[in-house]
Image: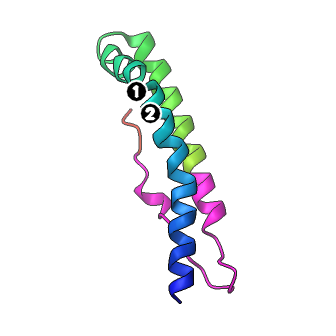
């Protein structure tokens, strides 16, 4: 049973680490876009589209990768319902 826990941690790390690296590499630009999006409608719409695509892709990947574990039981690394919804 402990092996499955380690496998889940490795899977979470495999999913999350590239996102963290992206934010670390481009954090200043992403922060600037978020700030400007509060002032400019065009940037706000652009950013909302980008974030919505990210959330949708993340949800699909979580659902795909957490559907069934190798032992045939349903498991969930992160429930897709915890992903944020974009305000309209």
Residue 68 is one of the magenta-drawn residues: yes
In the rendered view of the protein, which quadrant contains the C terminus? top left
Which residue is denoted by mark 1 in the rendering? 27
Q: How far apart in space, not on screen, are marks 2 and 1 (Cα)?
A: 5 Å
Quadrant of residue 44 in the image? top left
**Residue 76 visible, this orientation:** no
Q: Which structural element holds mark 1?
A: helix
Q: Where does residue 62 sit, x and y in percent of width and height? A: 57, 58
Q: Quadrant of residue 43?
A: top left
Q: Residue 80 carries which label?
A: none
The chief SS type of the magenta part is loop
Q: Mark 2 sits on what residue?
A: 23
**Residue ID at (55%, 43%):** 18
Residue 67, given in percent of the width and then of the height, sits at 64, 70
55 shown above or below 36: below
Query: How packed is label 2: few (under 14 Cα within 10 Å), some, or many (20 or more)?
Result: some
Figure check: 12 above or below 3 = above
Work out whether residue 16 can be spotted: yes
Residue for point 45% across, 59% down: 81
Q: Tell me the magenta residue range.
A: 59-84
Label 1: few (<14), some (14–19) or many (≥20) C-alpha neighbours in 10 Å: few
Q: Nearer the viewer, residue 83 or 20?
A: 20
- Name the residue located 51 percent from the left edge and 58 percent from the top edge: 13
- State yes or no: discs 2 and 1 in contact (Cβ < 8 Å): yes
Vertical order, 24 against 6 (above or below): above
The residue at 41%/44% (across/down) is 85
């Amino acid at each position: 049973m402990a092996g499955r826990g380690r496998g889940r941690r490795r899977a979470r790390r495999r999913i999350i680490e590239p996102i963290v690296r992206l934010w670390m590499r481009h954090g200043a630009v992403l922060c600037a876009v978020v700030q400007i999006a509060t002032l400019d409608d065009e940037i706000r719409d652009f950013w909302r589209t980008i974030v919505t695509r990210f959330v949708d892709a993340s949800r699909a990947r979580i659902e795909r990768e957490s559907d069934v574990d190798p032992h045939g039981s349903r498991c969930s690394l992160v429930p897709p319902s915890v992903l944020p919804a974009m305000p309209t």
